[in-house]
Image (tube, grey):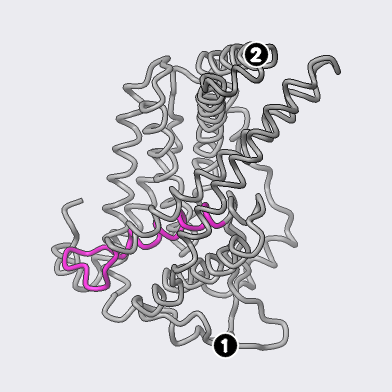
Amino acid sequence: MVESKMALEIETPPEAPEEIKQEESKKGPPPTLGEIVLGQLKTLREYHTAVMESGDVESVHKMRVTTRRLQASLDLLLMKDDEIGVRSLKKRLRRWRRWLSTVRNYDVFLIIINKQSSSRRPSQAPKFELLKTLLEERRRLRMEKVRRKLEQIDIAGIAESLGLSLDEPEPESEGDASTVIEADDSTVIEETTTPRPAGASFPGMDKKRIALRSATRLEQRLSEFLSLAADSHPTADPVELHELRIAAKRVRYILEIVSEIGYGDASRGLNWLRVLQDKIGDWHDLESLEEEIIDIVSRRGFIKANLSEGSRILQEAAHLRKKKDALVARLFPVRVPKNVAATSERLARALRRDGMREGGQNAASNEPSV
């Protein structure tokens, strides 16, 4: 069963050596949400530059991931009055990510095709070479369109609208380390004991308001995910599987942020959510590639010019469908381990305690309805 396999991957890690514990005790305070957002904006600008210059696989993927992480961070700043325009910023990030996804899909398709090709007989190479050539050309054309769309985006302007500055000099001190936010599926933190830059907090954004908003949002995201997981069943419906994956991502990202800003460890729950997300992602990649192959082969011009190879490519699509069905069979039923809910509830309680110490009722009343 899939749940037993997943459980093996999230066993409690061994006790850390004493020297690691001592080193961790020397670290400074955890970063503020402002510092996290500032780091994510700098990372976003870095990968945006790389996408515009080269459009390579890594920069496209990491810019896309950074938009999702930044969107999750900004969501914790969304109050009822929305004075800093979080809703608008989230829509903008979502739009950029959708553009990048249309390129990223081709990168994933080519990885899958290369793996399939390497495991087949040399006599089958022509169909794979033809498919790779077609996918590479589609990727090139899509990248040109996306670059034109991304050309005018203003990441520094987003920072300014939040009261932050991307070009503010970092404080330097021998032996000190700056906070680093990696735009991948893991977050690396190098704590710092130097004074925080002046632009690392949001004007009018009290820490207690953010804590209460984070608690509410974590509870909402967990409830949405648990509901979808409880109703899940073996299905080939891309919409249902995509909704479950997105719900898992939302819980995962908010747990990472809340843990990072110092409200408790969430590693065990995060490990399981990451495994589930990756398994559904593998299914989605195969589903998307199947649709792409059907679109290519169904075109009259292609099938007329490549009748023999076209039929072989369709056979490959049928093989991918078998792999896709096998993934679904192993995925369901989705049984969420108790530590996911327990961890989320523990962190939500810690956030509420912090938010209600002083003036919490006023902060709570300013939370948006969704």
Give coordinates of residue 357: x percent, y percent: 25, 69
- The quarter holding residue 334 reads top left
Q: Name the residue located 62 percent from the left edge and 28 percent from the top edge.
A: 8
Q: Secondary structure at mark 1?
A: loop
Q: Name the residue located 35 percent from the left edge and 35 percent from the top edge.
A: 225
Q: Name the residue located 62 percent from the left edge and 76 percent from the top edge.
A: 178
Q: Can you say which quadrant of the picture contains the N terminus?
A: top right
In depth, the one of 245 and 51 nearer the eye is 51
Residue 173 versus residue 309 in the image, above or below: below
Residue 307's disc is 2
- The quarter holding residue 121 reads top right
Q: Amino acid at mark 1?
A: Pro
**Is 74 colored magenta in this rendering?**
yes
Q: Which residue is mark 1?
A: 169
Instruction: Estimate how packed mark 2 is, as few (under 14), some (14 to 19) or many (20 or more) residues with alpha carbons within 10 Å.
Output: few
Residue 229's disc is none
In depth, the one of 19 and 300 nearer the eye is 300
In depth, the one of 336 and 152 nearer the eye is 152
Give coordinates of residue 176: x percent, y percent: 67, 81
- Magenta stretch bounds: 63-86
Residue 99 versus residue 210 in the image, above or below: above
Q: Secondary structure at mark 2?
A: helix
**Is 305 colored magenta in this rendering?**
no
Give coordinates of residue 277: x percent, y percent: 51, 35
Q: Amino acid at mark 2?
A: Leu
In depth, the one of 155 and 304 nearer the eye is 304
Residue 257 versus residue 129 in the image, above or below: below
How many dots with numbers?
2
Q: Is residue 3 visible?
A: no
For this view, does 52 lie left or right of residue 201?
right
For this view, does 79 lie left or right of residue 41?
left
